[in-house]
Image: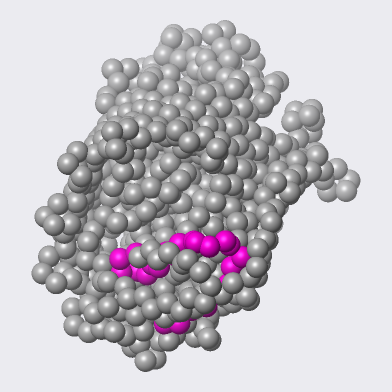
Amino acid sequence: MKKILLIINLAFFIPLLALQAQETTLVEVKGKVTDQDTKESLPGVTIQVKGTVTGTTTNVDGEFSLRTRLKFPFTLIFSSVGFQSQEFEVIGPGSNLNIALVTQTFLGKEVVVTASRMEESILKSPVAIEKLDIRAIKETPAPSFYDALENVKGVQVLTSSITFKVPNTRGFNVPNNFRFMQLVDGVDMQAATLGVPLGNAIGPTELDIESVEITPGAASALYGMNAINGMANLTTKNPFLYQGLSVYQKAGINHVDGIDRNPSLLTETAVRYAKAYNNRFAFKANISYLKGTDWVANGLVDQNPQNLASANPRFPELAGDNNPAQDQWSRYGDDRQARQAITINNRGVNQTFNVARTGYLERDLIYPNVKNLKLDGGLYYKLNDKVEVGYGYRYGVMDGVFQRGNRIQLKDVSVQNHKFELHSPNLTVHAYYIKENTGNSYNLNPLAYSLDLSHKSNADWAALFRSELQAQVNNGADLATAMKQARVIADKGRVEPGTPEFNQLKQTVINSNNWDVKSAALPNGAPNGGAAVWQYSNTYHGDFQYSISQIKWARVLVGGDYRVYEVQPDGNTFVDFSRPLDQRTVADANGSFGKSQYYSKYGGFAQVTKTFFADRLKLSASGRLDHNPEFSPKFNPRLAAVYTLAENHNFRGSYQDGYRYPALFEALSFLNNASVRRVGGLARVNEGIGFLENSYTLASFDRFTAAVNADVASGMNRNEAALKNRDVLQVANLPTMQPEKVNSFEIGYKSVLLNNSLIVDVDAYQNRYTGFLGQVEVAVPTSGKVGSDAAVIDMLTRSRQNRYRVYTNAKNIYKSYGGSLGLTYNFYKRYTISGNANYNTLSKNPNPDIFLTGFNTPKWVTNISFGNREVVKNIGFNVVWRRQDKVYWESTLANGEVPAYSTIDAQVTVKAPALKSTVKIGGTNIFNNRYHQFAAGPTIGGLYYVAVTLDGLLNK
C-alpha cells in the first residue's frame, strides 16, 4: 500500500515543478459593478482573469479589488447569475473600473464542462447534457438541490430514504445503481463496499453547491469504467469567488396524513464560511445537519401468488389473502428460504401445501428516525496566477434505508475523504483517499429470519403447524380457516413487535456479524444468527488531465487515473480468499478474518477536438484504455460531431462504447444470507464450490418440485418421482464473470429560437448491452455432479443442497432505446414555462435469460414547470408538475407493478436584500398523493417546508 500512496503523491506533486512561472511585479485592479437598469450595486459578482486561476468577487457595496502578477494586457470576465457576462481588457496599472451588467434575458448561454471535460457552450455539446446552476437551484420547489434532479430532462431519481436518493438515466434502474457515476469536485463518491454513491449524504451542502451537470448515457470513453448509464458532476463554490458567512435553516413536516407515522418535523441547518487573503490564500468550511422521520415501506403485495408452482395452484380456496405461502414486498422472513412443504390427510387424500413462515414487517424492523451530518473544508493556495493547489476534507455520517438484494438499515454510516488537488488553465490533478465504515447498519432479511428461528426451528414450526392444520381439517374447518388457525398456534410464543422481549432480541441480533443461521432453535430463545452489516474499505485514487496547448490545429486532451479498493475481511460479506474454504468466515485468536483484499483498475484517455468551416462543424474523437488485473484490457472509443446551421440550429451525433467493471460487491462478496450465500462472480470465489459449473437454476427447481409433488399425490414414491422428472432441472452452466459492455448511439438537436426566448432540445438514443450483469440463484448438490441420480435426489432435501445467489453475465443481448424533448420558453417579462417528455423502452428477447434484467424504467416521464423569479419586486414563484407511467418492477428482492403517479411541487420565494436574506415557502407533492417508485420501496407523501437563507454576511 505504501507503493500505491507513493505513486499517487508523485502524480500530484511532480507537476508542481513544471508549472512554476517567473512572477512579475504585483499590481492591483479596483472597481465597482452595478446593475445597468437599476444603477444599484451588485454584490457577489465573480471577476475572473481570463486564462488563469486568479479571481475575486464584489463585496456588499459592489466593490472589488484584485491583485495579480500578470503582465499587461489581460482580460477580466465579469459574471453573475441573471446577468450577461462581460469582458474587459486591462491595459495598464492604476485601473479603477466601473462596470454595468445587463440583465440576462436570453436562454442557452450556459457553459458546461462534463460532456467533453472542457468548457464549451451547452448548445454545442456533442452529447446530451443538462445543467442546474445557482439560479435554477434557488428557484426549484424541491426541498434540496439534489431532489431537484428529479425534474431534469432524462433523469429518474429513486427515493430509498429521505437521506438516500439515487439518480439514473436511460433505463436499467435499481436502488443500488452501479451504472451511474457521481463526481463532487472531481471525486468519485461511490462507497466501495455498498457499491453506490450515497446520494448526497456525503456531498455538498445546500449553501456550497454551485452547479450540477447531468450527462445521460455512456461516458466511459472520458471517465472510465462504471459511467455507462450516465453521470452527475457536482461543483462546489470556490472560496476565492464566494466569500463570507452564509446560514441556512429549513423546517418542514411530512407524514401529515398520519397513516404511516404521526406528523413529523424535518429540519436542516447549514453554515458556510469562506475567506480569501490577498487573493493568494483562501479557505472554506461547511457544516450541515438534517434530521427527520423517514418514509415507510409498507407494500404488502404478494409476489408469490397462489397460481405459481411455488405456492398452491391446485387449491383455489387458498388464493389472495388466504395464500399460506405469501411472500409480501415489505415483510421479511416469509420468502422461499422459510417456506415449508407440509403434508396432511384431507378426507382420505394426502395433500401437500407450501407454507411460509410469518416473518416481520419492515416498519417494525427499522429505525423511524434518520439523521445526516456533513462536514467539509478546504485550504487553497495560489503558487502564482497560473497554478492553484488545495487540500479538502469531507466527512459524512448518515442513517437511512438502502436496497440491494435486501433492504438494509443504514445506521451511523460514515465516509471520510481527503483530497489534494492542483489546477491550472491546462492541467488538473487529483489525489484522494476515501475511508468507508458502515457503522451500526444491519440487514432486514437475516434479522427477520433470526427472530423467527430464535422461537422455533423451521422443522419444529412446520411440525406444530401440520399438527394443528390436521386437527382443524379433522374438525371440519375449511382449508383457509384451518391454515390461519394453524399459523396462530405455530407462532404462539414468538417475540412480537413493540414488546421489550422483541426489542432486546432485535438489538442482540443486529449486534452480531455472524449470519450463519443454525438449523435448530437455540435454548432460552437465544438469537439464531446475526444481521449486522460491518464493512470497512479504503479507496486510493489519483488522476490527471492535461490540455496540450502547443498543438495549434486542434484541442487535445490527455489524462489517466489509477484506483485501488482495499476491503478488510469481516468474515461475513467479504473474506480472505487465500484461506481454505472452511476457514474464510472464522476469526483468528486476535479477531482478524485475514488479509485485506484488493481490487484495482487504471486507464488513460486522449481526446482530439477540431472545428471546421468557421467553427460551424466540431468533430471530436476520444479513446480510453482501461485495465483491471482480473480481466483483459478494454478499449472505449467515442466519435462525436456537432454542426451549427444558420447560427442557432445545432445538430449532434455520437457513437461510443462503454465497459463496466463489476463493483466490489458483485466481484468479491461471500455473504451467507438466510442459508443462501450471495457470492461474487470472479473465478477465485468459485474455487472449491462449483456454483458456476455444478448447479441447477432455482427457477427449474421450482418447476421440478411442483412436478414431483403432483406425482407423489398420485401415489408415486418420492425418489421415483424425482428421477422421472429429472429433465425438468436445468443445469445453470454460469459463465465466469466478465465486464458489462454497452454500445451507444445518440443523435440530438438543440436551438435557441424566437429572438433567444425559446430553447428546443431533442435527443434520441439506442443502447446495446452485452454481458449484462445481474444475479441468478442456483442450487449445488452435495452428493454428486449435476445430471447424476444422486444430484437429482439431493434436490428433494434442502439440507442436501447448497444455495448460492451468483453475480454473473446474462446470455442475451439487450437493446434499449428512447428519446427526450425539452422546451423552455421565456415569455412576457420574466415568466418562464418549461417542460420535458422522456421515453424509454427495452426490446424484447425471444428467449428468457438466466435472470431478470430489470429495465425498471417507465415508458413515459413528463415534467412541466411554470414560474417567474420576480413576479413583483423581490418575490418569485415556481410550480412543477411531474407524471410517471406505470412500470413492472423486477429485482432480486421484489417484483410487481408500480402504478402510475403524478405530483405537484410549488414554492414562493421572498427576498429581503436589506437583511441579506431569502425566505422560501414550498412543498413537494403538495396534494399528498401517496405513491411508491419501486417494488418494496417506501410510500412517499407530501413534504412542506420553510427555508431561510442568510447570505453575504461578514463579506467586507
Tell me which residue sits at (69%, 21%) in the image. Answer: 687
Tell me which residue sits at (74%, 31%) in the image. Answer: 577
User: Start and end of the magenta stretch?
Assistant: 62-85
Q: Nearer the viewer, residue 366 or 605?
A: 605
Tell me which residue sits at (75%, 35%) in the image. Answer: 576
Whether residue 835 is visible: yes
Name the residue at the front extreme. 92
Tell me which residue sits at (11%, 55%) in the image. Answer: 754
Q: Quadrant of residue 895?
A: top left
Q: Is residue 66 magenta?
A: yes
- Residue 110 is situated, as x and y percent measured from the top left of the image, at 33, 56
Left/right of residue 819 with respect to residue 893 in the rendered view: left
Q: Nearer the viewer, residue 262 or 505?
A: 262
Q: Nearer the viewer, residue 554 or 579?
A: 554
- Residue 461 is situated, as x and y percent measured from the top left of the image, at 54, 44
Whether residue 810 is visible: no
> Where the N terminus falls, by quadrant?
top right
Left/right of residue 201 with respect to residue 435 in the rendered view: left
